[in-house]
Image (cartoon, grey):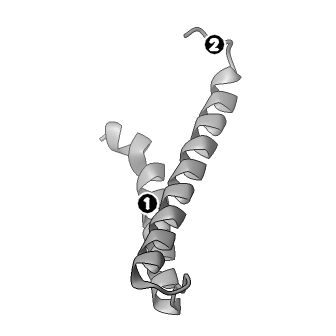
Amino acid sequence: METRPGNWKAMALVIGATVGALTGLAAAFMLVRRAERRGESLNVSTGEGLRMGLLVMGLLREVAALPDRGER
């Protein structure tokens, strides 16, 4: 696939947004399914929310460090 110079930035943002939306949808689906199996409404505790937030921050830090690792 041939792209014009500068178009790769927009393509990277679109792909990143799509992957992020699909990942979020999958996570929400798993949480809803877990709640249904337990026979209760969706309830995410403060601890679970904090743990998920820290995991996302760690993932973002690792993604940001990817280009740096190739230069070492």
Decide if residue 3 is on the left or right side of residue 46: right
Alpha-carbon neighbours of circle 1 within 10 Å: few (<14), some, or many (≥20)? few
Q: Nearer the viewer, residue 33 or 72?
A: 33
How far from the left and from the top, in percent, is residue 50? Answer: 50, 83
Instruction: Using the image, tell me which numbered label, if any, was put on residue 59.
Output: 1
Seen from the viewer's position, the closer of residues 71 and 25 is: 25
Q: Nearer the viewer, residue 42 or 16?
A: 42
User: Which residue is found at the position 43% from the left and 60% from the top?
Assistant: 59
- Tell me which numbered mark, 1 or 2, is placed earlier along the sequence: 2
Task: Please give the name of the residue rendered at 51% of the width and 63% of the height, measured from the top-left corner.
Answer: 29
Q: Residue pushed farthest top?
A: 2
Name, please, the residue furthest toward the left. Answer: 72
Determine the secondary structure under disc 2. Answer: loop
Q: Secondary structure at mark 1?
A: helix
What label does residue 37 carry, if any?
none
Location of the C terminus (image quadrant): top left
Mark count:
2
Q: Residue furthest front?
A: 39
- The percent coordinates of residue 41 (x first, y second) are 55, 84
Residue 35 percent across, percent down from the top left: 47, 79
Q: Residues within 10 Å of mark 2 (few under 14, many from 20)?
A: few
Quadrant in the picture for residue 25: bottom right
Q: CA distance from mark 1 to mark 2?
A: 29 Å
Badge 1 amino acid: Leu
Instruction: Identify the residue position indicated by label 2 in the image.
Output: 3
Q: Quadrant of the N terminus?
A: top right
